Amino acid sequence: MEPIHVVAGVIRDVRGRILLARRTQGRDLAGLWEFPGGKIEPGETPQQALQRELREELGIEATVGGPLIAVPQHAPKALMLDVYEIKHYRNAPRGLDGQALAWVPPEKLAQYAMPPADGPVVAALLQPDRLLITPEPVDGDAWLRALEASVERHGIRRVQLRAPLFATSHPDDWRRLVEQACASLRGQGVDVWINGDAGLAREFDAGLHLRSTQLSSPAASEWSGLRLAASCHSMAELQVAAGLRCDFALLGPVKETRSHPGVVGIGWNMFRDLRAQVPVLPVYALGGLGSADIVESRRNGAQGIAAISAWNA
Ligand SMILES: Nc1nc2c([nH]c(=O)n2[C@H]2C[C@H](O)[C@@H](COP(=O)(O)OP(=O)(O)OP(=O)(O)O)O2)c(=O)[nH]1
Ligand SMILES: [Mg+2]
């Protein structure tokens, strides 16, 4: 069955607060808060449908801006939640269907109970659209300098420290590099994640990025109290990541990568289908992708892209 195409708008006031509407009684998802909008009718473009919905529900005349994210959802209802920024609007929004309205500071959005497909929308508004994954160090000091330069130059706000080979062969050197990287990246305002090692994540107060192999036998007690993220290659792994309440997951490879020549990617259609099985969870696309792919990733329901080599320069 074709998914229902729903359009919704991110409407802001002069203080940067975002408008949520509460679904009225007697409809599905009653009582939950949502971005104002509704179903596209035959013959309408998404922009036309959104203008109409905002006029009907709020009494505003809106100019629809750029797309934010299109979240595919498989169950309980097959739908595509297609969200746009609203650039300008005339008139003050009113709840014309009797729905309650709330102007919510972005950092408080998570306090409102929303439908599952809104999880990735809120994440798209609040969390970085790029995740830098470090390469293996050859020379530790050069690795650290290159990491700092890359973060600075490309405005990166989320980093995964990953070097499975070096961490195994030089554990003490790796620990020292992680300590230094955590200190300096935090000074640059970066959200830091450590690959695989719960002890280091705890010691340096970073998030723990789980390898896909760690998802097959989750060590929930060892990970308790840590922020978690996970690398996934299948629906089963994504479901474990969602069950662990990971902040986000990585899914790929979407395209063939330099590090794995000959391994064919899953492509965007498969990415979208897998992503649709795990509402709520923000998912970065990984594998052969760079900044130029962010817009396409968002059209396929991704938080953005993760890459080892895209921002090394
Ligand atoms: N508008 C909106 N709908 C959402 C959001 N998240 C989410 O899962 N949905 C779902 C709920 C519904 O199943 C569907 C929207 O359908 P709806 O019933 O509100 O559609 P509508 O405004 O055209 O109203 P109706 O006349 O058909 O009742 O999308 C969201 O943030 N905003
Ligand atoms: Mg509606």
Image: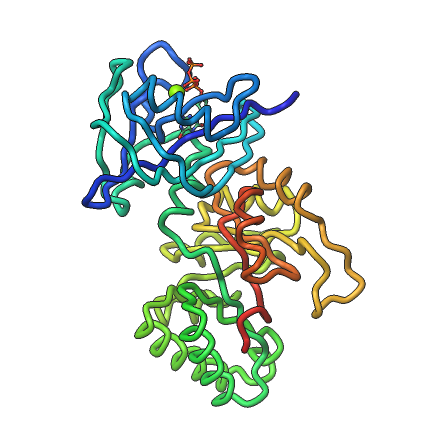
Residue at 19% of width from left, 45% of height from top? 15
Q: Position of residue 191 (x, y in %)?
A: 38, 64
Q: Is residue 29 above or below residue 69?
A: above
- Count of numbered circles in the view: 0
Q: How is the image coloured?
A: rainbow
Q: Is residue 205 above or below residue 234?
A: below
Query: Between residues 156 and 66, which one lies in front from this camera angle?
Result: 66
Residue 169: quadrant of the picture = bottom right
**Rendered-image quadrant of the C terminus:** bottom right
| Ligand 1 visible in quadrant | top left
**Rendered-image quadrant of the N terminus:** top right
Query: Between residues 308 and 45, which one lies in front from this camera angle?
Result: 45
Q: Is residue 163 above or below residue 299?
A: below
Q: Position of residue 232 (x, y in %)?
A: 60, 52
Residue at 46% of width from left, 33% of height from top? 117
Query: Between residues 140 and 51, which one lies in front from this camera angle?
Result: 51
Q: Residue furthest right?
A: 262
Residue 42: quadrant of the picture = top right
| Side of 90 where 302 appears, left or right | right
Q: Residue furthest top?
A: 26
Residue at 30% of width from left, 74% of height from top? 187
Residue at 42% of width from left, 40% of height from top? 121
Q: Position of residue 310 (x, y in %)?
A: 57, 69
| Side of 116 where 232 appears, left or right | right
Q: Is residue 306 above or below residue 96?
A: below
Q: Position of residue 4 (x, y in %)?
A: 55, 22
